[in-house]
Image (cartoon, rainbow, N blue to C red):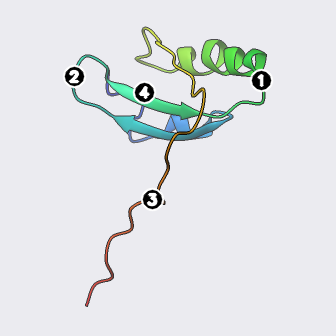
Amino acid sequence: SSDVCSSDLEVEKLNGVRACYLLSGETDFLVHIVAPDLDAYNKIVLNQLMTLPGARSVRTSFVLDKIHSVPPLVPPAAS
């Protein structure tokens, strides 16, 4: 549902949320969360993310190691 990253941006108010992306395909949204440990992450998901309007299910993945990273894309300055 589009409610998770809706215009009122409730997801921005959640602890640890770094970004929220609208996706194509079977998954509707990707929410990037940073937490100090698994217990804190679990509390964010169960007590905050899953209480948002439209949140029906959550599938999680964890970064195990960074293989390659580049700086964020920055649009060229307008001339």
Give the Cα separation between the discs numbered 1 and 2.
30 Å
Task: Find numbered disc 2 in the image and state the secondary structure of the residue it sits on.
Answer: loop
Give the Cα separation between the discs numbered 3 and 4.
24 Å
Which circle's residue, 2 or 3, is located before the other in the chain?
2
In the picture of the structure, the residue carrying the numbered disc 4 is 4
Crowding near the residue tagged with mark 4, few <14, some 14–19, many ≥20 C-alpha atoms within 10 Å:
many
Which circle's residue, 3 or 4, is located before the other in the chain?
4
Task: Find numbered disc 1 in the image and state the secondary structure of the residue it sits on.
Answer: loop
Give the Cα separation between the discs numbered 1 and 4.
24 Å
Which circle's residue, 1 or 2, is located before the other in the chain?
2
In the picture of the structure, the residue carrying the numbered disc 1 is 37
Q: Which mark is residue 72?
A: 3
Is 29 on the left or on the right of 13, as rendered? left
Question: Which of label 3 and label 4 is nearer to you?
Answer: 3
Question: Which of label 1 and label 4 is nearer to you?
Answer: 1
Indicate whether 71 appears above or below 38.
below
Tag 4: amino acid = Val
In the picture of the structure, the residue carrying the numbered disc 2 is 25
Is 79 on the left or on the right of 49, as rendered? left
Image quadrant in which you'd find residue 49: top right
Q: In which quadrant will I find the N terminus?
A: top left
Do callouts 2 and 3 mark residues in contact (Cβ within 8 Å)? Answer: no
